[in-house]
């Protein structure tokens, strides 16, 4: 588990002052949420958000008027806010200026009109509440020839039951399409089975009288039987157990599995899931397990993954930083410990121009970087 430790930063990095405390020994009873309570409460009264939200909306409207929108002013207005305030801004903006932008369904449409490229895409997501932003991410990931599978599984796996139910409902409200039917048309084989298990929003509430060591032993044996204990892996059976198990129970399953078979459950997943061409399936399954048992380390790894290989996956990097912003303080601490590099430094090495400025501001809103102009 990662600790709050900045000693491994490289010499060329700016200094960062950690706003968190160490959480290395924490055991989770349920999957952690990514959305703020405000979004889950579904408060639909934007006229009561106060003068500060109105002033930010006014600044965005002013910065996008006329010929050529002011990119820096929009960054300063939107990317400096946390996900709860951005939700308020998104709702209030359309109430204040919707009559002036009748062809826009939401503030993201304004950003799409005024800005382009990776920068414009990031602003589209920032201009929406997080549940709507994720729906737009999914819609974009399923447009064109070939779905962006990494975006899909990273949004669908490792979610709370409430967030998954709200995601499905919101997707239909935004696009008048059933999310499960669209996914069925884009995914195939075991990846489809994994995502559809996640869609069920079936994680059990942790109950120590039910989630006993004996049940963990039974589940560990079942996973082994579905995988290494038979000819051909029964991925569907494995996915059902993984999706239903709350984090604390999954930790017990891992202990029982390691005690009986000599290696961790995660190692079994790496060895058994998918064939030569199913690297994505293994990544997605390990991500699902990681989001339940060590979420901040898992999110840190996905951000790093977006920047590895031949060229940065800007779409995945953008989605990760915006989706994970409420947890970026803990994620950054993990990234420094695991990779000896802050997320700030990663962004500086992988992005450029105003896109880099925007991504840095998203992180700085949670973990301010010092010593950089």
Image (cartoon, grey):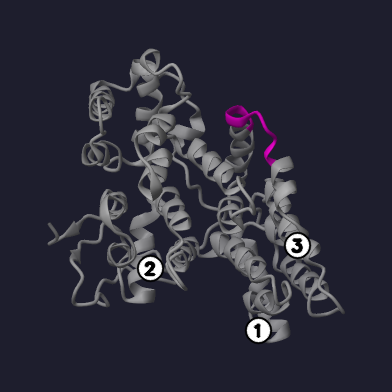
Label annotation for residue 190: 3
Q: Position of residue 304 (x, y in %)?
A: 43, 68
Labels 1 & 2 near each other (Cβ < 8 A): no
* Residue 282 figure quarter: bottom right
Judged from the image, the secondary structure of the residue bearing numbered disc 1 is: loop
**In the image, which residues are magenta?**
172-179
What is the C-alpha distance between the residues marked 2 and 3?
30 Å
Q: Position of residue 186 (x, y in %)?
A: 70, 50
What is the C-alpha distance between the residues marked 3 and 1?
24 Å
Q: Is residue 241 left or right of residue 49?
A: right
Query: Which residue in the rendered view is the most extreme toward the bottom?
Result: 262
Tag 2 or tag 1, which sits nearer the N-term? 1
What is the C-alpha distance between the residues marked 1 and 2?
24 Å
* Residue 232 within the segment the image draws in magenta: no
Q: Is residue 101 left or right of residue 286?
A: left
Residue sitting at x 43%, y 63%: 303
Residue on which the image places disc 1: 263
């Amino acid at each position: 588990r990662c600790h709050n430790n900045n000693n491994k930063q490289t010499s060329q990095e700016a200094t960062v002052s950690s706003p968190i405390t160490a959480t290395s020994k924490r055991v989770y009873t349920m999957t952690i949420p990514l959305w703020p309570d405000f979004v889950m409460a579904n408060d639909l009264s934007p006229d009561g958000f106060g003068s500060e939200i109105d002033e930010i909306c006014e600044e965005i409207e002013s910065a996008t008027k006329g010929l050529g929108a002011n990119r820096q002013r929009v960054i300063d207005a939107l990317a400096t806010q946390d996900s709860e305030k951005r939700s308020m801004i998104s709702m209030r903006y359309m109430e204040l200026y919707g009559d002036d932008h009748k062809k826009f369904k939401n503030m993201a449409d304004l950003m799409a009109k005024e800005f382009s490229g990776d920068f414009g895409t990031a602003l589209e997501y920032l201009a929406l509440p997080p549940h709507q932003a994720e729906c737009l991410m999914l819609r974009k990931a399923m447009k064109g020839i070939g779905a962006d599978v990494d975006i899909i599984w990273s949004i669908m796996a490792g979610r709370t039951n409430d967030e998954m139910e709200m995601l499905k409902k919101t997707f239909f409200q935004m696009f008048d399409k059933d999310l499960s039917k669209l996914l069925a048309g884009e995914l195939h084989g075991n990846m489809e089975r994994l995502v559809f298990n996640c869609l069920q929003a079936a994680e059990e509430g942790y109950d120590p009288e039910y989630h006993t060591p004996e049940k963990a032993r039974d589940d560990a044996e079942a996973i082994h039987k579905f995988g290494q204990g038979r000819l051909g892996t029964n991925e569907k059976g494995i996915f059902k157990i993984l999706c239903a198990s709350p984090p604390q129970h999954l930790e017990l399953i891992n202990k029982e599995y390691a005690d009986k078979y000599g290696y961790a459950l995660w190692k079994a997943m790496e060895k058994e899931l998918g064939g030569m061409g199913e690297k994505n399936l293994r990544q997605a399954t390990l991500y699902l397990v990681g989001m339940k048992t060590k979420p901040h380390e898992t999110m840190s790894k996905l951000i790093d993954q977006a920047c590895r290989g031949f060229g940065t996956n800007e779409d995945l990097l953008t989605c990760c930083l915006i989706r994970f912003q409420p947890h970026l303080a803990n994620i950054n601490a993990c990234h420094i410990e695991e990779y000896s590099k802050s997320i700030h430094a990663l962004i500086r090495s992988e992005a450029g121009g105003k896109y880099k400025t925007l991504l840095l501001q998203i992180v700085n809103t949670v973990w301010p970087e010092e010593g950089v102009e």
